[in-house]
Image (tube, rainbow, N blue to C red):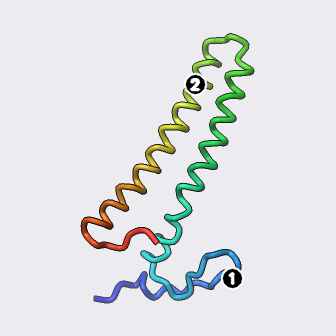
Amino acid sequence: MKVFAQDVNLPSYSGTGFNFGSASLGEIFSQLLNYAIVLAGIAMFGFLIAGGFDLLTSGGNQEGIKKGTNKIVMAIVGFIVVFATYFILEIIELLFGIKVTG
Protein backbone atom coordinates (compact mmCIF):
# COMPACT_ATOMS: atom_id res chain seq x y z
CA MET A 1 0.00 0.00 0.00
CA LYS A 2 1.43 3.34 -1.02
CA VAL A 3 1.25 6.15 1.49
CA PHE A 4 1.30 9.61 -0.03
CA ALA A 5 3.33 11.12 2.82
CA GLN A 6 6.30 9.04 1.65
CA ASP A 7 6.44 10.97 -1.63
CA VAL A 8 7.18 14.32 0.02
CA ASN A 9 10.43 15.84 -1.23
CA LEU A 10 11.68 18.63 0.98
CA PRO A 11 14.75 20.74 0.34
CA SER A 12 17.92 19.99 2.25
CA TYR A 13 18.87 22.92 4.47
CA SER A 14 22.65 22.83 4.52
CA GLY A 15 24.35 24.09 7.64
CA THR A 16 21.27 23.80 9.85
CA GLY A 17 21.36 20.10 10.65
CA PHE A 18 18.02 19.53 8.93
CA ASN A 19 18.73 17.11 6.10
CA PHE A 20 15.24 16.15 5.02
CA GLY A 21 15.90 15.54 1.34
CA SER A 22 13.34 12.94 0.32
CA ALA A 23 12.60 11.79 3.87
CA SER A 24 9.21 10.48 4.82
CA LEU A 25 6.95 12.32 7.21
CA GLY A 26 7.87 9.88 9.99
CA GLU A 27 11.58 10.50 9.49
CA ILE A 28 11.01 14.25 9.58
CA PHE A 29 9.06 13.88 12.83
CA SER A 30 11.85 11.76 14.30
CA GLN A 31 14.45 14.40 13.46
CA LEU A 32 12.36 17.23 14.88
CA LEU A 33 11.61 15.25 18.04
CA ASN A 34 15.25 15.54 19.04
CA TYR A 35 14.82 19.29 19.37
CA ALA A 36 11.65 19.05 21.47
CA ILE A 37 13.47 18.92 24.82
CA VAL A 38 15.66 21.88 23.88
CA LEU A 39 12.63 23.94 22.87
CA ALA A 40 10.76 22.88 26.01
CA GLY A 41 13.74 23.93 28.12
CA ILE A 42 13.86 27.34 26.46
CA ALA A 43 10.11 27.77 26.94
CA MET A 44 10.39 26.69 30.59
CA PHE A 45 13.16 29.23 31.16
CA GLY A 46 11.02 31.99 29.66
CA PHE A 47 7.99 31.08 31.74
CA LEU A 48 10.12 30.85 34.90
CA ILE A 49 11.38 34.37 34.25
CA ALA A 50 7.84 35.60 33.55
CA GLY A 51 6.52 33.94 36.71
CA GLY A 52 9.35 35.38 38.77
CA PHE A 53 8.66 38.81 37.33
CA ASP A 54 4.98 38.45 38.29
CA LEU A 55 6.02 37.51 41.81
CA LEU A 56 8.40 40.45 42.10
CA THR A 57 5.90 42.98 40.79
CA SER A 58 2.91 41.66 42.73
CA GLY A 59 3.61 43.98 45.64
CA GLY A 60 2.06 41.54 48.11
CA ASN A 61 -1.15 41.28 46.11
CA GLN A 62 -2.46 37.73 46.56
CA GLU A 63 -3.77 37.57 42.98
CA GLY A 64 -0.37 38.55 41.56
CA ILE A 65 1.42 36.03 43.77
CA LYS A 66 -0.99 33.30 42.69
CA LYS A 67 -0.54 34.24 39.02
CA GLY A 68 3.27 34.12 39.26
CA THR A 69 3.27 30.87 41.22
CA ASN A 70 0.94 29.24 38.70
CA LYS A 71 3.24 30.25 35.82
CA ILE A 72 6.25 28.71 37.56
CA VAL A 73 4.42 25.50 38.48
CA MET A 74 2.94 25.07 35.00
CA ALA A 75 6.34 25.68 33.38
CA ILE A 76 7.91 22.93 35.46
CA VAL A 77 4.99 20.54 34.92
CA GLY A 78 5.07 21.17 31.16
CA PHE A 79 8.78 20.46 30.98
CA ILE A 80 8.34 17.26 32.98
CA VAL A 81 5.59 16.14 30.59
CA VAL A 82 7.82 16.71 27.54
CA PHE A 83 10.79 15.06 29.25
CA ALA A 84 8.68 12.05 30.32
CA THR A 85 7.21 11.71 26.83
CA TYR A 86 10.68 11.54 25.32
CA PHE A 87 11.73 8.80 27.73
CA ILE A 88 8.50 6.87 27.20
CA LEU A 89 9.25 6.91 23.48
CA GLU A 90 12.77 5.67 24.23
CA ILE A 91 11.33 2.79 26.29
CA ILE A 92 8.91 1.91 23.47
CA GLU A 93 11.87 1.92 21.10
CA LEU A 94 13.77 -0.50 23.34
CA LEU A 95 10.85 -2.83 24.01
CA PHE A 96 9.43 -3.10 20.52
CA GLY A 97 12.43 -2.30 18.35
CA ILE A 98 10.60 0.54 16.62
CA LYS A 99 12.78 3.47 15.57
CA VAL A 100 10.87 6.45 16.99
CA THR A 101 13.50 8.99 17.94
CA GLY A 102 16.25 10.03 15.54
Give the answer, above or below, for where 43 lies relative to 88.
above
Give the answer, above or below, for where 61 lies relative to 49.
above
Q: Quadrant of residue 93?
A: bottom left
First in residue order: circle 1 vs circle 2:
1
Q: How many numbered markers are drawn?
A: 2
Residue at point 69% right, 82% down?
14
Classify the position of the N terminus by image quarter. Answer: bottom left
Give the answer, above or below, for where 75 lies relative to 64.
below
Q: Quadrant of residue 52?
A: top right
* SS for callout 1: loop
Residue at point 33% right, 89% down?
2
Q: Position of residue 30 (x, y in %)?
A: 46, 71
Residue most extreme to the front:
94
* SS for callout 2: helix
- Alpha-carbon neighbours of circle 1 within 10 Å: few (<14), some, or many (≥20)? few
Q: Say which residue label 1 marks.
A: 14
Residue at point 42% right, 81% down?
5
On residue 69, which mark appears?
2
Please, what is the three-letter code of the amino acid marked with disc 1?
A: Ser
Q: Quadrant of residue 54?
A: top right
Cα distance between the residues tagged 1 and 2: 42 Å
Residue at point 49% right, 64% down?
33
Q: Position of residue 90 (x, y in %)?
A: 37, 62
Give the answer, above or below, for where 6 lies relative to 44.
below
On residue 67, which mark appears?
none
Please, what is the three-letter code of the amino acid marked with disc 2?
A: Thr
Please name whichever residue, 2 or 96, is drawn nearer the observer in this view of the structure: 96
